[in-house]
Amino acid sequence: MSDQDTGEKTFEPTEKKRSDAAKKGDVLRSKEVGTAAAIATGGLVLMMVAPGIGSGLSQVARSGFAFDRAALERFSPGGLFAEAGAALLPPIIALGLAVIAMTVGAQLLLGEGRFVPENLQPKGSRINPLKGLKRIFGVQGLIELCKSLLKLACLGTLAWIWISANLSGIMALGRGPLAGQLEFALDAAGVLAAMLTVGLVAIAVVDYPLQKFQRDKRLKMSHKDMRDEAKQAEGSPEIKMQRRQRQRDLARGSVAGAMKDADFVVVNPMHFAVAITYDPGLAPAPVVLARGRGETALAMRDLAGEEGLPVLEYPVLARAIYYTTNANQMVREELYVAIASLVAFVFALKRGEKPKSPRIDVPADLRFDADGRAQKIP
């Protein structure tokens, strides 16, 4: 049984499918990418604000542990907290804002720049016990478990390496000058952040293509989905009819003036049309006033009916004139005989006669198909 019969989803999602899914909140998500970006940003900003934090901590320590008789008599805990906040809050706030901005930016980048407020709304499916168990014990839960074990092993190994390298310094904290202890602590924290960043980036490199693969698999389309999307793109018959009518109206406007001065129209019978006039006082040969194909040709037929112009169906001649003569030009000399026959026929009609439709012969080198390619005469 074919994919068309079973509805099996085997086609890669189209751009429209991806875009529609993103509008509904189904975007590419990777917590590992966001975590790696946040930790990397935090470590970088920490290195930048470390001197300020160290200076603030030193100032707070001096203020808290150095006091005299006057300080004891006018003891003010609020003042100490205010001084500590003024010294420590600016660098800490800068660190927090940078991490928040990077986290949000990374998720927006993965989510095609979309913020979907609907995802913040409470959903019953999120607290449904059955669906929760399915997430835990399903394929996705197994994948998340493996990712968590991988993350634990990777980050745990890096943390063990860091502790082994800094154990002596950590054990010595509290026995040296305060400034030296703060400097060591901030440096060690920066190194730890850098090591964790390396590990998280490695995990993100694995997680990103995995999440992309899972989303693409989730959005795969069946043969019916492809057909429905194509129909939706084309629009309903009513919409297509309205679109064609607008095109016809535009085409009418472009040739309406020329059609008023034409003597007759040669058509093919629906795809090509050329409006011709013959006035010996203006030009020694018939002149093409307008030419068109498709919607313009249909508009010229409509206008010819409104103006009462003869519409002559000579497909080979219509294509020959269309591809060899522009608007407001005389027809090619090789077509004089053919056009003269039509002129005589039309003028006879205007005199009230009933002439027979003339037979037209178009030179072999002026015969073209609908695409303008020279036709081979058997």
Image (tube, rainbow, N blue to C red):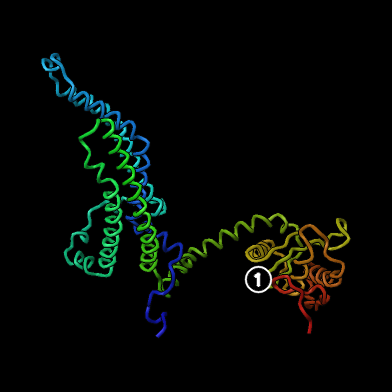
Which residue is depicted at the point 75% across and 57% down? 261
Drawn side of residue 167 relative to residue 350, left or right: left
Where is residue 316? Give x, y as percent: 75, 75
Question: Across the whole image, how many numbered discs are drawn on residues?
Answer: 1
Left/right placement of residue 349 relative to residue 216 reads: right
Quadrant in which the C terminus appears? bottom right
Q: Report the amino acid beneath label 1.
A: Met
Is residue 324 visible in the rendered image? The answer is yes
Residue 248 percent location from the top left of the image? 60, 61
**Residue 315 occupies which quadrant of the picture?**
bottom right
The percent coordinates of residue 197 (x first, y second) are 35, 50
Nearest the camera: 132 or 283? 132
State the image coordinates of residue 360 (x, y, percent, origin top left): 81, 76
Q: Is residue 74 above or below residue 137?
A: above
* Quarter of the view holding residue 265: bottom right
Q: Residue at x 18, y 25 (%)?
A: 64
- Snapshot quadrant of residue 126: bottom left
Q: Is residue 70 toward the left or the right of residue 210 in the image? A: left
